[in-house]
Every structure is written in structure tokens, then in C-alpha cells.
Image (cartoon, helix red, strand yellow):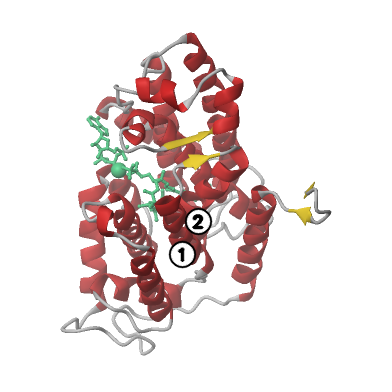
Amino acid sequence: MVASTAGEVAMSSEEKVYNVVLKQAALVKKQPRISRDLDVNPDIVLPGTLSLLSEAYDRCGEVCAEYAKTFYLGTLLMTPERRRAIWAIYVWCRRTDELVDGPNASHITPTALDRWESRLEDLFQGRPFDMLDAALSDTVTRFPVDIQPFRDMIEGMRMDLKKSRYKNFDELYLYCYYVAGTVGLMSVPVMGIAHDSQATTESVYNAALALGIANQLTNILRDVGEDARRGRVYLPQDELAQAGLSDDDIFAGKVTNKWRNFMKNQIKRARMFFDEAEKGVAELSDASRWPVWASLLLYRQILDEIEANDYNNFTKRAYVSKAKKIAALPISYAKSLIRSSRMYPSKA
Ligand SMILES: CC(C)=CCC/C(C)=C/CC/C(C)=C/CC/C(C)=C/[C@@H]1[C@@H](COP(=O)(O)OP(=O)(O)O)[C@]1(C)CC/C=C(\C)CC/C=C(\C)CCC=C(C)C
Ligand SMILES: Nc1ncnc2c1ncn2[C@@H]1O[C@H](COP(=O)(O)OP(=O)(O)OP(=O)(O)O)[C@@H](O)[C@H]1O
Ligand SMILES: [Mn+2]
């Protein structure tokens, strides 16, 4: 905590977000999981001509496969019920992101985000607006998923509309929580914690949050040039200044030693969040560990690729080759067999 000049005690973003983590962990412990047959969910009013929920989920799967093939393949390793739920969450996140990042982004106003949020409230109450919302509406009755991280992701999009600079890491951390840490908090109740895990629920949520933050920091470091061309700098201004750099250096896009040193520190920080996340993966339920390890290893390799590009993230896009993606699969499978804090072997 930081005391301001006015005397009141200000909370850091990390502390604020940790309070959300504690709340999510407490909710998941309380809420019992309801299991029903697919397509028989009396709590949902299906929109339009939609007669079967399975059609809605299939459509979510198609959207997911179209936007993120690698990730879609990962979800195929999960149980069918969990896989469908993750698709529904993925599609909602992707649609939310498209509002500010997609082809119609220039027309998006805070009012449009307010409307998206009231649609979110409706779908959590069993009144989905369209087919894709209907799948998520069903998911949130089957798994103890809370609305807060979804609201927070919309808040992140609001932030993105009005803010294009971040004073320090504390401000950037909050943005990363809103747009990506939230994904971790949404996913854990679906992926499930292993029945014999000795870890606390909070620590697993904390690791999930860390993976979201790590992914977003990596995404930012990969896209520095692309974002600068849209007038945006998602880097801590105070750290840029300490490194002797300014926005103008970023717009000029020249790889200098100052830039390399700055990038080394940013990469180091992103890796620390990946390390934090690693501690939680072993606690997830059996079928969820493999896809999460795969996504962690693949996303983390983008950092290695930025190094391999000699820190030119202005004009070169760092990406992981198909061969490396394939190589990550057996490695992540082997890692998913390791179950750190558990005392007994799995029954599954
Ligand atoms: C198995 C798994 C990875 C599950 C998560 C699936 C899920 C619901 C993903 C939604 C992702 C999404 C569309 C988010 C919207 C905002 C956004 C675009 C965030 C960026 C993702 C990267 O996407 P991409 O490379 O396509 O970016 P471009 O738009 O092309 O620029 C983010 C960087 C954030 C993604 C964050 C996660 C996937 C969180 C992962 C955390 C977990 C799955 C928790 C794991 C649990 C433990 C205990 C570690
Ligand atoms: N091996 C590659 N070759 C060329 N472009 C790539 C490669 N990998 C990723 N990209 C580009 O970067 C974008 C984002 O990559 P990301 O790492 O998020 O993979 P993704 O969304 O899971 O997509 P996919 O798995 O279908 O490649 C891709 O949509 C693509 O435009
Ligand atoms: Mn992508």
C-alpha cells in the first residue's frame, strides 16, 4: 500500500487485483456444480430459431477453430463438457476484443460497451441475446463461473478506448489484468482443480492470473511496432525514460542498444509471470493440464523469438514456427504428467 500526500492509503493495482482473486476463490468453494444433460436447461430462454444448445456450442467451436487453430487443437484434449464451455468463453472474449480491435473498432463508443455489458448481465440471468451468448448462458449454469472477470474485461476495453499511454507498470498491470488476467479467472472454474490437489484455491487462481498477465505482456512486446502505427504505446513510460528512451524512439523504430537493454528487462519481467503461472498448472484437473502447458510453452517462446530477432519488434513479427509448435506438444504432455504438490497418485 502507498500513502498519498492527502494522507489516504492508496492500493496498488496488484493489491486491488489480488482482492478479486480472493473473491473468485471464495465463490468457487461455495458454489456447487450443477450437472445436467446438454440441451435440457430450463433456466435459459433460447433466442430466435435456436432449438438445440448443442448447435450453439458447435458454432462456438467453429469460431474458435477459425481464429486460433493451435488453441482449438488444445481444447480437443479436454473432456467434451469442459471443451464446449471453454469455446463459449473464448468466443465471448474474442467478440469483446473485436469490439475495440476488429474492423468496426473506429465506430465503437463507450455506449456500445455499456450495451455489451447489459447483454452480459442478461445472459448471466438466462436471457441470451443470440446463439453464441446462449452457449455461454448455459456454461455459467454448469460451472461456477462468476460474472466479475467478464465485467472487468469490458472495463479493460473501456480503458483501451480512452488511454494510449501507461505511466508506470502499476497502470499497465491493471490493463493486463482487465484484458487477459480475467481470462485465467474465467477458465479455472471450467478446467477444474485436481481433486487431490494440496494447493489452496487462491494459489491456483493466482497462477491463472499470472498466466493471463504473462501472455498479455508477451503480446504487447511482440506487437510494439504494430501498436505504435496505431498511435499506442503499451509500455511503462517511467521505465522508458529511465532507459533514455521516449515515444519518439518508438515511432522511429530503430533498434539501438538502449532499446535492447530496455527490452531485456521487459522480457525478464514477462518470464517472471510465466514462472509464477507454472506453479499452478500442476494443480489443474488431469485433462486440463496438457492444453494449458502447451499454451504456456508456445506463448512463452514468442519471447525467445523476439530475442532471436535481435529485439526488432518494430518491423519483424516474432512467431513460433509450425515445427516448434509441434515439438511443444510432447514436451507439454510430459510436463502434464508431473503433479507437484499431490500426496497420492491420481485415480483418473
Ligand atoms: C487452455 C486455455 C489457454 C484456455 C483459455 C481460453 C480462452 C477463454 C481464451 C480467450 C482469449 C481471448 C480471445 C481474449 C480476449 C483478449 C485478448 C485478445 C487477449 C490476448 C490473448 C492472445 O491472443 P492473440 O495472440 O490471438 O492476440 P491478438 O488478438 O492476435 O493480438 C491474450 C494475450 C490473453 C490470453 C490469456 C489467456 C489465454 C489466459 C490463460 C490462462 C489460463 C488458461 C489459466 C490457466 C490456469 C493456471 C492455473 C495456470
Ligand atoms: N508460423 C506462423 N507463420 C506465419 N504467421 C504466423 C505464424 N504463427 C502465427 N502467425 C500469425 O500470428 C497470428 C497470431 O498468432 P497466434 O500465436 O495468436 O496463433 P493463433 O491465433 O493460435 O493462430 P494459429 O494457431 O492458427 O496460427 C496468426 O493469426 C498469424 O497471423
Ligand atoms: Mn491469435
- Residue 180 at x, y = what percent? 47, 50
Q: Write down the residue under mark 2.
A: 182
Q: Where is residue 14 in the image (x, y as percent from the top left)?
A: 66, 48
Q: Residue furthest right?
A: 7
Q: Look at mark 1 in the image and give the residue it sits on.
A: 150
Q: Determine which of the numbered discs, if any, sits on residue 121 in the image.
A: none
Between marks 1 and 2, how big is the CA–CA gap? Answer: 7 Å
Q: Which of 309 and 248 is in front in this view?
A: 248
Q: Which residue lies furthest to the left in this view?
A: 49
Query: Which residue is painted at 40% across and 76% down in the image?
Result: 118
Q: Which amino acid does label 2 sit on?
A: Thr
Tell me what residue is drawn at x 84 percent, y 54 percent.
7
Q: Which residue is drawn at 67% across and 61% down?
A: 22
Residue 254 seen in the current view: yes
Q: Tag 1, which secondary structure? A: helix
- As displayed, is residue 78 above or below residue 336? below
**Circle 2: is it few (<14), some (14-19), or many (20+) Cα within 10 Å?**
many
111 on left or right of 73: right
Residue at horizontal 50 percent and vertical 56 percent from the top = 182
Residue type of the residue flagged with mark 1: Phe
**Quadrant of the image occupied by residue 87:** bottom left
Q: In this view, does 116 lie above or below 202?
A: below
Say above or below: 79 vs 339.
Answer: below
Q: Is residue 338 left or right of residue 111?
A: right
